[in-house]
Amino acid sequence: MASDDGSVVLTFNGEIYNFRQLRESLQRQGYVFRSTSDTEVLLQLYRQDGPGFISKLRGMFAFALWDEPRQTLFCARDPYGIKPFYYADAGGIFSFASQVKALVLDPRTRRRPDPAGVTGFFLFGSVPEPWTVFESVKALPAGSTLTVDRTGAHAHKHYYSLSAAIHAAEDERTALPTAALQQIVREALLDSVRHHLIADVPVGVFLSAGVDSGSLVGLIRDAGQTEIRTITLSYEEFQGSVNDEAPLAAEIARFYATNHTTRVVSASEFHNDLPKILQAMDQPSIDGINTWFVSKASHEAGLKVAISGVGGDELFGGYSTFQSLPYLTRMLHVPARVPGLATLAQAAVRLAESVGLPVHPKLAGLLRYGAELSGTYLLQRGLFLPEEMGEAIADKAFVREGLEELAPFEFLSRVLEGGPKTDFGMVSALESSIYLRNQLLRDSDWASMAHSLELRTPLVDHYLLEAVAPLMIAGRRPSGKALLAAAPSRPLPDEIVRRPKTGFGIPVQSWIEKGPSNQMHTVSNAKPFSRGWARSVAAWQQVTC
């Protein structure tokens, strides 16, 4: 879209949820609008405030704005990194896109694999930004802007940091009675839900049997939406087991009186869709297939926009890592610093393996990496440890180059630089900046967009973060998930709140091992316990892609 005088041109992917308030403010100052779109609001806001307008936006976005009088391109990405922004700068040409594969179609863009990006995938299960799988393509970091002019692309600038926001919340933390906590959480959640419901078409919900999506359905009802369409996945392999989301999801749907669909996915459908899944994936991931199928089911139901509960665990402390990482770090902090002890432990593990004893591959890493929270994070969230990378990538020089550039522990430590100091705050920052951003949000984007579905995430919102984080860090209080479950005017039933966490599970390893596209045999000979499902899928995907 171009401004009325042609001085500013914008290409934009996303949604600005507070555009109506911004539009009204601009109109009071004399700005005239030709449309009702949020895109035009961005144009006019830039004309008024220049690049500083980015701080006024609430939403998910990636955009590039050409300023004709200044001959500059201004690029920006939202604070959480919900929407992707990739760029290449080669041969005097700056190119940008929402997908890496679009950029490598340009013959000027070198297709050499990026050692840091590929190595990062096997460490974390997703490619960590700003790297991609190609050396010549980078990701604009979340919460950053980038300016390009005739002299080239300048260093990106951070305008928002999740770690800094969490650190600021630590300074604001205040212990409050439970009733006051619940009221603040409810109002903040309702505010986010109302903003995310602004649409010209019906908005559906991805419904699991968990607290996050179930609470959002109740809050959507409270926000005034009377017709709610909910979608749940079911798998034949899970029926009758604790992994089957369908029965409890159906109970939530009945509880909130939604128009509910349970979509059964079979192994044969997975194999039929697999080429399209890999094509849409853009960059490798060990996750996202569940979002592919629930997005497909939503598209079949006629939905154009859907709500997801992603982000609730990072915000409200729902992962076991909020307890296990601080505990492990405290337990290992002293022994991990004893000279030679880590080397001795590694030798003992190798001896056990040599005589055929099953040993978990991360056992030796406890003393090597357990002295700092960033190290225990990699131990718990990582697929392969750095010294195990030979299992995944045969080229030792490539691995060495990748690890040197990525510097995984420095990379994780940078997430916490100048940021949170509390256990809750540090784990929240790591989970939000690594797992949520690089895996869950990226998978949500490609899998939903492949089905022409706009996916919205009310629990991934920096306004909500700033309202809720001081309460989560404030010491003794009800669990974050209990506060979330109690937020709707009709709180979630106890059987949902007390249910062990499973999430949107999917029997992908079973399908890969038993199906016609089985290529597991091409993976290196595995030692006992050396592969969980995620490691196997990662190695299989490398071969398949």
Image: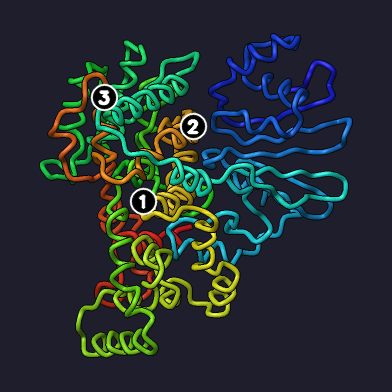
Please tell me which residue is depicted at 38% across the width and 62% down the height of the picture: 377
In the displayed structure, 342 sits above or below 401; it is below
* Residue 132 appears left or right of 348: right
- Nearer the observer, disc 3 or disc 2? 2
Question: Mark 1: which secondary structure?
Answer: helix
For marks 3 and 2 on the same chain, the one whose residue lies earlier in the sequence: 3
- Distance of label 1 from label 2 (alpha carbons): 19 Å
In three-dimensional space, the C-alpha distance between marks 1 and 3, rounded to whole angstroms, equals 37 Å
Q: Mark 3 points at which residue?
A: 261
Query: Which sits in the foreground, 89 or 522?
Result: 89
> How far across and how far down the image is residue 162, in percent?
51, 45
Near mark 3 (Cα within 10 A), the count class, few <14, some 14-19 or many ≥20, is some
Q: Which amino acid does label 2 sit on?
A: Tyr
Name the residue that disc number 1 marks. 424
Picture coordinates of residue 72, whole percent (x, y):
83, 38
Badge 1 or badge 3: first in the primary sequence: 3
Quadrant of the snapshot with the N terminus: top right
Please tell me whether residue 71 is drawn above or below residue 506 in the rendered image: above
Amino acid, disc 1: Phe
- Labels 1 and 2 touching (C-beta < 8 A): no
Name, please, the residue furthest toward the left.
Answer: 240
Quarter of the view holding residue 123: bottom left
What residue lies at 46% left-to-right and 53% top-to-bottom? 420
Is residue 101 in view from this perspective? yes
Mark 1 vs 2, N-terminal side = 1
- Tell me where residue 348 appears, x and y as whole percent: 27, 88
